[in-house]
Amino acid sequence: MEIFGIPLPALTGQLLLGLVNGCFYAMLSLGLAVIFGLLNVINFSHGAFYMLGALLAWVGLNNFGIDYWAMLVCAPILVGLLGMVFERTMLRRLYKLDHLYGLLLTFGITLVLEGLLRSVYGVSGQPYSVPTALQGVTDLGVMLIPTYRLWVVFASLGVCAITWLLIEKTKVGAFLRAGTENPRLVEAFGVNVPLMVTLTYGFGVAMAALAGVLAAPIVQVSPLMGSNLIIVVFAVVVIGGMGSIAGAVITGLGLGVIEGLTRVFYPEFSSTVVFIVMAIVLMVRPNGLFGKEMA
């Protein structure tokens, strides 16, 4: 069976690949949106924290025998703690300055982390085996899908949904949003706003690390894997609207599927279609599809 002259297995395979990539885009752009929307910081080091999550999972398995499921919990916690230290010692000093200073600092942190890890582990990608429980394929009736990729889709969507509910529908999220708008008023209610800001940054980078652990069995783990992805993720955030939680998730998933379809119908544009969409969106709606209009 063919659709527009394309064999159905090839079309569904690329759609699946696009959906999986879209899940990674959604998780990473969601972390970026949380940090920018609540802390007003452009976190260019997000790709480095994504890489750290994957590399910690690889090191844990190969050097210490710690399996995938344990690292799925431990790696985000460790990276989140590192992010909190970074926020308390360096990033906090730049909150009242122009966004450019935060961008330059986080870019410098990325270069330092990548340089250090590249000197230890090199630049060649390292394989990470799929956990035994998620090996094989699952029959969905219309197609066969690798079980691990199906797990990635459900896990990513679950994390994105929980994050959106936490920020938009709970008292904690209300305090976070209020703390960014009027920290003195929130502190008057007994809320430790600086600690809340630190925890928020740690949560954002922990999400990047979680995406890295999920990606480890699919991609080659290397110190450069974050820099290859972060530019695309920033484009996703810009298209969805800087700071928009729902925009990050919907745009990430949508652009992943569009990228997969482009590989089928026009492969030459598959690596640039995200940026073409970004250019079109910015011309029509400069604040992004889900961004708020500036007063």
Image (cartoon, helix red, strand yellow):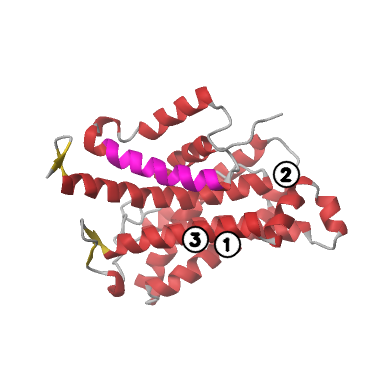
**Residue 269 location, x and y as percent?**
29, 30
Q: Name the main secondary structure of what is drawn in magenta.
A: helix
Return the residue nearer the eye: 36 or 63: 36
Return the residue nearer the eye: 122 or 76: 76
Return the residue nearer the eye: 135 or 294: 294
**SS for dot 2:** loop
**Residue 31 location, x and y as percent?**
54, 51
Q: CA distance from mark 3 to mark 2?
A: 28 Å
Q: Mark 3 = which residue? A: 159
What residue type is disc 2 on? Tyr
Q: Residues within 10 Å of mark 2 (few under 14, many from 20)?
A: few
Return the residue nearer the eye: 258 or 273: 258
Mark 3 or 2, nearer chain start = 2
Residue drawn at x 44%, y 68% is 72
Q: Residue furthest left?
A: 1
Corner quadrant of residue 94? top right
In the rendered structure, find residue 95 and report the number of the disc placed on it: 2
Q: CA distance from mark 1 to mark 2?
A: 19 Å
Quarter that holds the N terminus: top left
Q: Mark 1 = which residue? A: 80
Quarter that holds the C terminus: top right
**SS for dot 3:** helix
Mark 1 or 2, nearer chain start = 1
Q: Is residue 41 left or right of residue 270?
A: right
Start-end of magenta stretch: 246-262
Q: Residues within 10 Å of mark 3 (few under 14, many from 20)?
A: some
Mark 3 or 1, nearer chain start = 1
Can residue 116 be seen from the camera position used here? no
**SS for dot 1:** helix
